[in-house]
Image (tube, rainbow, N blue to C red):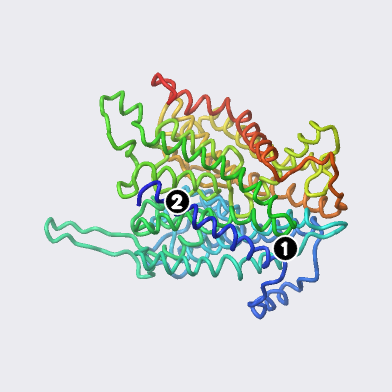
Amino acid sequence: MGFFLTIALLVVVLGIAWRYLGSYMADVFEGRVRYLAWAERPFYRLLATSPEQEQTWKRYAGSTIIFSALFLGFGYLLLRIQGSLPLNPQHMGAVTPALSLNTITSFVTNTNWQNYGGETTMSYFSQIGVLTVQQFVSAAVGISVAITLVRGFSRRNSPTIGNFWVDITRCLLYILLPIAFVAGIILVGEGAVMTLAGPATIRDAINGVTQTIPRGPAGFMGAIMQLGTNGGGFFNVDLAHPLENPTALTNVLYICLTLSIPFALTYTFGKMVGSIRHGAALLAAMVIIFGVWVGITSYSEHTNNPAVVAAGVHSTVGNTEGKEVRFGDTSSALFNVSMTQTSDGAINSAGDSYTPMGGFGLLTGMMLGEVTPGGTGSGLYTILVYAIIAVFIGGLMIGRTPEYLGKKIQAREVKLAGLAALVMPITVLVLTAVAVSLHAGRAGPLNAGPHGFSEILYALTSQGNNNGSAFAGLSGNTAFYNVVGAIDMLLGRFAIMIPALALAGALAAKQIVPAGLGTFRTDNGMFIGLTIGVIIIIGGLTFFPAVSLGPVVEQLSHGKFF
């Protein structure tokens, strides 16, 4: 499927998803969709709660932490005793302690960073009962937290922001399970493998060689890993594997699944706050940055790799090293940009083989904070943090107290927004400095010089943004990188999520102030531009020195920038 045809198809499908899926999600979280009420009730009885028993932001945050911590501990235990559990036709043994910690932390935080090869490390039980389950749950947690921040803007004088247990139940029952089931059927119908029969053994009658081909329940896992912007694949090569991503249709479907909920949540936001224009403004900021990064990366990958050119090799089909020929250079770049800008992290080509500026596109897309459009839920609540900072700057320019959707943005809200925006850059840069300062960290990259630095920076940026994509070229399955990565992922998830919930509580308790002649509008082109500026400045100025030491130096070492 051609690059521009793929773009056109994405625009149509995502436009439909934005309007109708976005509206549907608003109805779900406002309690207007109840066709599975009979399935909700047992969960509420088990948890001794109900939709009428709402929580303060502190109780909501506490529920989120406890829920995630239980899955963290239980998942760690299951990985450690994997060898004694059922559905293990490959006879996989227990996962090591450091790798178990890194893996379960990765899936609980919706990062899905993988320091292992799925088909050579995880049993079918671990893939289904631990990792796939968590792909549903972690996505639902992110969406639920985003909805609380939306409620913060839509409510007035409210001490509560919803009920975590109700939100996550409805998200799973009405949104994630139905869509993932239908997508799984399509993927399996297209050829994605779905079996519990174990590996297949094939003997080549011509040369007498016997080959073992790993198989497993990859088809339905692929559906939720993309829909939930998880990205943790069944196979080591992820969505470059023909048994997990077999056709051009599945390749496009994976992109659509990844982008649909993050983009559609902006419509959900607009509908719940009573102004679709405000949701469209956030969408516009996301789309503009996303489109620019797709353009930069696709153009870079359609040119020759300068290192290859320096070796005297010239290509007429772009930089195809590390890519599937069936997908091509530009479509592969589109796929990987979609995954690095959605907190998904799945890949269908090797980022380590990209040109320096192609790698720059993947790396810096994450450094902008995963808001274009970001992960399921996390993209919306993070871009709302940036929007609050933009409103604060706008209020300073016009000389009055900033307001957003009728809520005055005062000192507490600005401090919380600033904390949420700066946690990720500080975490990533500090841990990168630690990694390049210690022998255990420097032993990881397989390349020297700026490219080796890029491999370290990319890994810690990916984990700190709960993205999970790997640049490759880094030996990450060591005690050092497993433990540091786990810390990185936990801070990248919960040190942003908790301030977002605190923001929701602070905003919900406020009165709505009617707009006046001096009110700074937050639904027009000026606000879109200001929000984009805040995103670029925070990501650009914070990370520019580090990026300059990696892909920029590598590109300039070949004599030109583009």
Image: 116 above or below 554: below
**97 or 10, which lies in front?**
10
Residue 164 - label:
1
Q: Residue at x 60, y 58 (%)?
A: 138
**Which residue is farthest front?**
517
**139 or 133, which lies in front?**
139
Residue 32 - label:
none
Q: Is residue 394 left or right of residue 343?
A: right
Q: Is residue 538 left or right of residue 354?
A: right
Label 2 neighbourhood size at 10 Å, few (<14), some (14-19), many (20+)?
few
Q: Disc 1, disc 2: CB below 8 Å?
A: no
The x and y percentages for residue 375 are 58, 51
Q: Residue at x 34, y 41 (%)?
A: 322
Residue named by callout 2: 8
Element on which disc 1 rests: helix
The x and y percentages for residue 12 are 49, 56
Q: Amino acid at mark 1?
A: Phe
Q: Amino acid at mark 2?
A: Ala
